[in-house]
Amino acid sequence: MGASSSTEAEREPLLVPSHAEANSPPVNSRVYGRRWLVLTLFSLLGLLQGMVWNFWGPIQNSAAHAYGFTKSDIAVLVLWGPVGFVPWLLFMWLMDKKGLRASLLLSAFFMLLGAALRSIPLTEQPLRRWFIHGGQFLNGLAGPTIMSAGPYLSTTWFAPDQRATATAVASLFSYLGGAASFVVGPLVVPAPNDTKAVTTMAATVSDSSIRDRIQLVMYAELAAVAVLFAAILLYFPSRPPIPPSVAAASQRLSYRSSICRLLSNMRFLMIAMAYAVPTGVIAGWTGVLDMVLTPAKVSQVDAGWIGFWSTVGGCVFGVAMARFADSIRGMLKLILVLMLAGASLSSTWFALTCLSRVTHLPSTAAILYTSCILVGIFINSSVPIFFELFIETVYPVPEGITCGVVTFLGNLFTGLLLFFLTFYCKVNKKYIFRPS
């Protein structure tokens, strides 16, 4: 079998080498020690935003007893995160025109207002539920800036040989917040005992205790958001006095030109779809993981640990891969191909395990846990590598606008999945899948 010669278009490289960065920094560049404080404040805000967003999914059984939430209600509470990306163009414009400080302060204010709104201890349950939904929506409005500004922060404050690592830390801390909620929620909030037929008085006391524990966690998150908002208000500069690299000091395209350049670049759109589909689906799936695994007879606490380790593993592996990419340039595409291949094999393994009645494959708790955790590790760890690939592909488009577009696409797929689950639960009133 002969092989035909490749064309010029096929031999054209996927990534155009960045002429803005050199191996040696320019004379007028400088790296400031305060960059670590800026990165810490930004990352902690992402951590809290992820914790608030993923608060209800890991305790969906407890929330059903405390507030009468159905599975559809839980899906909607998680859905408010992607809905917050609807005005993403406005947030990207604010970041481009006013800088990172103004956009991050606005996001922190939305988080503070949302955390306060859902923490109001109303006795009237219907009104209380509306306040909780409103608080989740306001927290979702902080998502466009927090989830897309990591590469912009790393380019503005960090040297080229630290940029991928800083991008990984800034981008993955919001995922780490979601992982923390998998542990904090189930450990602090007691799970209901649905299997025992007890008296009405005992059930009432149990539901009241659950509500008190949920309220305690919401108060704690409100206090943490308030402290962080005050810290950012006191000190969070948009950029250093002297840029750390040529890329940070170079002239970028305007807001309108950047959007037009991105939407007309087919290479960028293809990579964006490769990012948005797996990361968007896994984000929505993780948000309702307890609901997904309940039919497989996985407890609320065990589902929380599965979600925790899959996300934490993805964060640790993602930072390690980003550090590796910092030291060896030009291997981003290969790293992503290997990660997505691992995610495909792991998700296939998980699906076949759940369908063991048809496939006759062994279905044990160890296999279920391992396959589920591996899916999260491979997909979540690819996020910072994707961000670096986007930046190199569409330079000189500003990093915030580039990552704003792709995070919007990712949350679009998250919203579609949760929207489907919302109506699926209402129509069928059954579990998402049946255990074998």
Image (cartoon, rainbow, N blue to C red):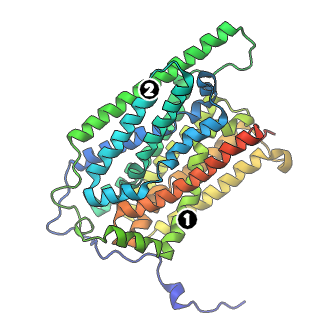
Q: Is residue 302 left or right of residue 427?
A: left
Q: Position of residue 365 (x, y in %)?
A: 71, 37
> Mark number for residue 341?
none
Q: Position of residue 138 (x, y in %)?
A: 43, 40
> Mark number for residue 119?
2
Residue at image coords 26%, 56%: 98
Q: Residues within 10 Å of mark 1 (few under 14, many from 20)?
A: some
Lower sequence index among marks 1 and 2: 2
Distance CA(mark 1)–CA(mark 2):
37 Å
Q: Residues within 10 Å of mark 2 (few under 14, many from 20)?
A: many
Residue at image coords 67%, 49%: 420
Q: Quarter of the image holding residue 220?
A: top left
- The amino acid type found where label 2 is placed reads Ser
Q: Pointer 1: what residue?
A: 273
- Badge 2 element: loop
Q: Quarter of the image holding residue 75?
A: top right
Quarter of the picture holding the C terminus: top right
Quarter of the picture holding the N terminus: bottom right
- The amino acid type found where label 1 is placed reads Met
Q: Is residue 161 left or right of residue 208?
A: left
The reply to whether the C-beta atoms of the residues labelled 1 and 2 are less than 8 Å apart is no
Residue at image coords 65%, 58%: 344
